[in-house]
Each structure stands twice: as C-alpha cells, then as structure tokens.
Image: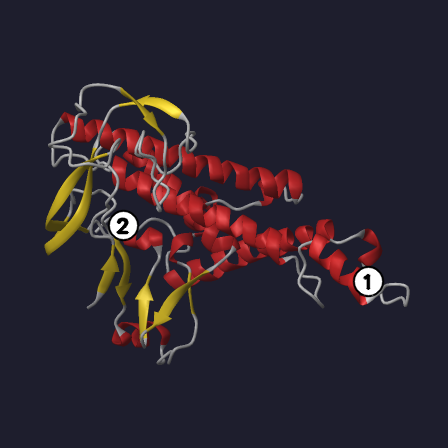
Amino acid sequence: MRVSGLVIRTGVPLPPASGPVRQAMMHKDGVAALRESMRLYGQFCRSISLTWGLSLAHLPSWASTTEELHRRGLWMMNAQRDFLIHVWSRARRQLRANIEVRTLPSSWSAGPPTSDRWSHYQYTAMVRSLHLPHDTRQPTYPWHDLEAAARTSLARAVDAYNFLEDSELSELAHRHVHHVAALVGGLFGCNIEYSDDTYWDVCRLTLMHSRWGMSAGFTSTRNCSLCAQDIETCQHLLDTQYEATVRHDAHGTCNACGQISCPHTDGETVSAFPRPVMSELHIHEVSLVSRPRDPLARFLKVEMSRDALLQCLGEDPSGRDICCYRCLHPCSGFD
C-alpha cells in the first residue's frame, strides 16, 4: 500500500516533543485554525442565506441528518446513503437555482438576448461582467467561490483537530469537522481520486479519523526568524523582543509571528521575539506514529485496494469516477 502525505513543515516554529511549551503551542495554533475554519464556515452560511437566498432552515446539517437516520432506523450503509443523497441533492438544486436566478438579469429569464442590436462584443462584455461562461446560463464563478471557501474551511478544521487532539477542545473540533465535511460533500460532492492507474482515498474526514502520522529523523540548520542567520551565532536572544521588518516567505509565513494568516503586512516594523526556523533539511528516515512531532504531518492520500473496490462496487471501476459519501454518514469512530 502506498501513501502520500506531509512529513514535516519547514519555515515555521515546531512545538517540542513534549512538555508544557508543546501544549501551549498546540493550543494556540489549534485555536487559530479553528477560528479561521469557523469564520469561513460562517461566511459561507451568510452568503448562501443573504446573497443567494437559501434559508439556513432548509440547509441540512450533519447533526440533523444523523438524528434523522437514527429516528428512521436506517442502519444499513446503502439505506443511509440513499437517504442522505436525496436530502442533500434537494438543497444543492435549490441553491444552484437561486444563484442562477439572482445572477442573470431579469430580461434574460428566457435566455441571452438575440436581438440584432446586441453585437457579439456587447454580449461578451455582459457575460464577463456577470462571470458567466460563453453560451451558457450556468453561473460557475459564484458556485466555485462558495466551494473554495467551504473546502478551505474543512482543511483548516482538520488542522485544528490535529492540533487540539489532546486538549479539552478536541470534541468541539471533532464535531466541527463533521459539520463542515457534510456540507462540502453534500453540496459540492467528493470523488475518490484516480491517478497513476490507482484509486486514492483523499477524504480529509476519513483520513483524519485514522490517527497515523509521520515522524521524520532529520538533520537541519536552525536559522533566526528575524535575520535568517544561524541562530547559534547571530546577535538575537530568544527571550528578548526586537524591532523587526515584516516579510513573508514564498509560502506566506510571517517572520514576525510565524503564522500564515496574520494581520502583518510586508515592510511594517513590529516588535517580535526571534524564533528558530529550520532550513537545509535532510531527512534520513520516516516512522509511522500516532503523535508526530509536527501535528500536521499526516497522510493526505492512501492507496485503495482494487479488490476492496471490486467487492464494494460489484465491478471493476476501470478508471471511472467514483463518488464518495462517507462524510455524510454518522461518525464511525477513530482508528
């Protein structure tokens, strides 16, 4: 079985292997990720309610559908799947219909104008201003923007749980991941990835419930976050604040606070403590562990057995798209 994932991050401060400092760093990063995920989730709900006119009362949730499955006594996987597809398909059709109606001008209710007074240039300009593809009324950009926000919220929710797994916020983070994952899978759908003649499990929710991570044996240089010199020989002391000019690296990491999403802008001067940042990383071995040093060093995709797929589907998919509905189902626990 082949796997693909993150072994270790560079350019960011990593928590120590154990102790109160690790707990404090994990809590801080976890809360930041959880807040970002909830903010995006809230913006998504606000957009579909106020901008696109779908009442939140008509939007299914993971908690409500799980409760309804139990109330109806639907314990078999196939029965659960059919019910969940029906519920979420109805919400998806309503939302897309609302987006289409609110995006197009009222005069286009029967289709784009065909009068001779509309030149090709005018028609093209109108379509571009509405973010609509040529020769179609389907509003792709608003839908894609909603999907991007939802999937980013899911990714950050999974990050939050990986940080907060051993804290008092773990169950809150866990339930939040389920809520966002059900929304992503229900409204936008998820497919099992097919590449390199292999099917890969890329479901963020499913992979999160397999509590395996990667711990790397490596050597590296520790540089100062403020001056980028070797932290053992530079003039900065770790327990002293210094005036520093903010800069973000190619990955968007801030040298002042070590965060990717932060209020600092390049060029401004702030007070910051120096931090050790790894560079020139050389990995010697990777071990599978339940608690990796880097809490985000997790699997991103896992090879799926063709025999298992054949047994589940009843036939060889032979490279065809396979829809995944696992994020809509009740939680089956952690592995």
Going 24% across and 48% down the picture, which residue do you hit? 334
Q: Earlier in the sequence, mark 2 or mark 1?
A: 1
SS category of the residue bearing label 1: loop
Front residue of this view, candidates 89 and 105: 105
Name the quadrant of the N terminus. bottom left
Image position, residue 203 (x, y; %):
35, 57
Q: Is residue 229 above or below residue 61?
A: above
Is 24 left, or right, of 69 in this rendering? left
The reply to whether callout 2 and callout 1 are in contact (CB within 8 Å) is no
Q: Dot 1, crowdedness within 10 Å: few (<14), some or many (≥20)? A: few
- Spatial CA distance of label 2 from label 1 is 48 Å
Going 29% across and 54% down the picture, which residue do you hit? 207
Going 44% across and 50% down the picture, which residue do you hit? 151
Residue 169 visible (yes or no): no
Image position, residue 6 (x, y; %):
24, 53
SS category of the residue bearing label 2: helix
Is 28 left, or right, of 63 in this rendering? left
Of the residues shown, which amino acid type is indicated by label 2?
His
Quarter assignment of residue 29: top left
Residue, disc 1: 110
Residue, disc 2: 209
Front residue of this view, candidates 313 and 301: 301
Total marks shown come to 2
Is 207 left, or right, of 65 in this rendering? left
Q: Is residue 145 above or below residue 14?
A: below
Q: Is residue 266 above or below residue 207?
A: above
